[in-house]
Amino acid sequence: MSTGGLRPLATGLAVAGVGGLGWALVEATRYTLRHHTVPILPSGSAPLRVLHVSDLHLVPTQRDKIAWVRDLAAEAPDLVVTTGDNMAHPQALPAVLEAYAPLLERPGGFVFGSNDYYAPEPKNPARYFRPTARKKLSETLLPAEELAAAFRSAGWVDLTNARDTLDVDGREISFVGVDDPHLELDRFPPAGPRRSPLHLGVTHAPYRRVLDAMHDDGADLILAGHTHGGQLCLPGVGALVTNCDLDRRRASGLHGWPGPRPDADGGERSTWLHVSAGLGTNPYTPVRFACRPEATLLTLVGRP
């Protein structure tokens, strides 16, 4: 190809790149509420609505995100579960509590991720393609204990390497949770005396070792975040990375673990797994492509 022919091609690629970046910046603020129906309750049970929120990565100036999360209370969930990475700024605690305030009036449970303990910092994007790379932690600590205390004071159960139960709409739910596996803080809690008819597993990062342990523990549904759904996805291809050892096809959405969906042929031994693509990004890479920020309303219904 001649030099004259290469120049228009280069110009076209540059324009496409700028346009793609512009859209990725816009898409990172196009919050959406996903809906899934999960048949895990005893046959004939009334539905139970679980709101799964993850990866806010909130900074105090994100008023649109704060307002959007507050408005989720209008969905009237029976239970709220957050799977961590709430803060993206040392002064974000008041903003996070403002966002969650209407939801804190409902039963809930929580675990934390790295961006509840340590402030985000610029990173080489290539690190996301090496999930086993040594984690470099920021020296700036976040007010994790203050956030946990606020959640606990609202009656939410702290599932940091712990088990607990909640009475939700007259039904007992048991939980098992772990601290952030991405930081290798997870310590699976010893078996409890019994599980409730509905048993949920909660983790920030969906590492295989944790999913296996929760599956073996008899969880009916596992909730996780961390992956950002890949954050930068290719149409027709999906997520390029998960930032953990979970396979890319389960980077977000409702799936089965360890095999196919539990309602699929041959999947009867699998556990339902929901991985949230989350609502935020690292503030130093505030982009998403083909992967809108999300929260999810899971409607639990009776098994067929």
Image (tube, rainbow, N blue to C red):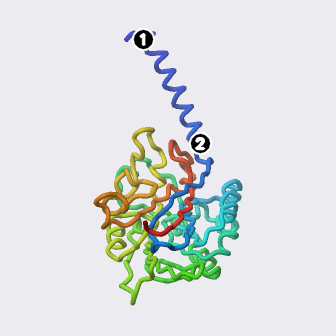
Q: Residue at x 64, y 79 (%)?
A: 154
Q: Position of residue 275 (x, y in %)?
A: 45, 59
Amino acid type of the residue that numbered disc 2 sits on in the rendered structure: Leu
**Which residue reaches farthest left?**
266
Question: What label does residue 210 carry, if any?
Answer: none
Quarter holding residue 195: bottom left
Identify the element where label 1 is drawn: helix
Labels 2, 1: front one: 2
Q: Residue at x 45, y 43 (%)?
A: 233
Q: Position of residue 207 (x, y in %)?
A: 36, 64
Q: Which residue is mark 1?
A: 3
Q: Which residue is mark 2?
A: 25
Question: Which label's residue is closer to the chain start, 2 or 1?
Answer: 1
Q: Residues within 10 Å of mark 2 (few under 14, many from 20)?
A: some
Horizontal arrangement in the rendering, residue 25 relative to residue 263 (left or right): right
Horizontal arrangement in the rendering, residue 248 relative to residue 223 (left or right): left
126 vs 225: above or below: above
Q: Position of residue 156 (x, y in %)?
A: 58, 78
50 vs 254: above or below: below
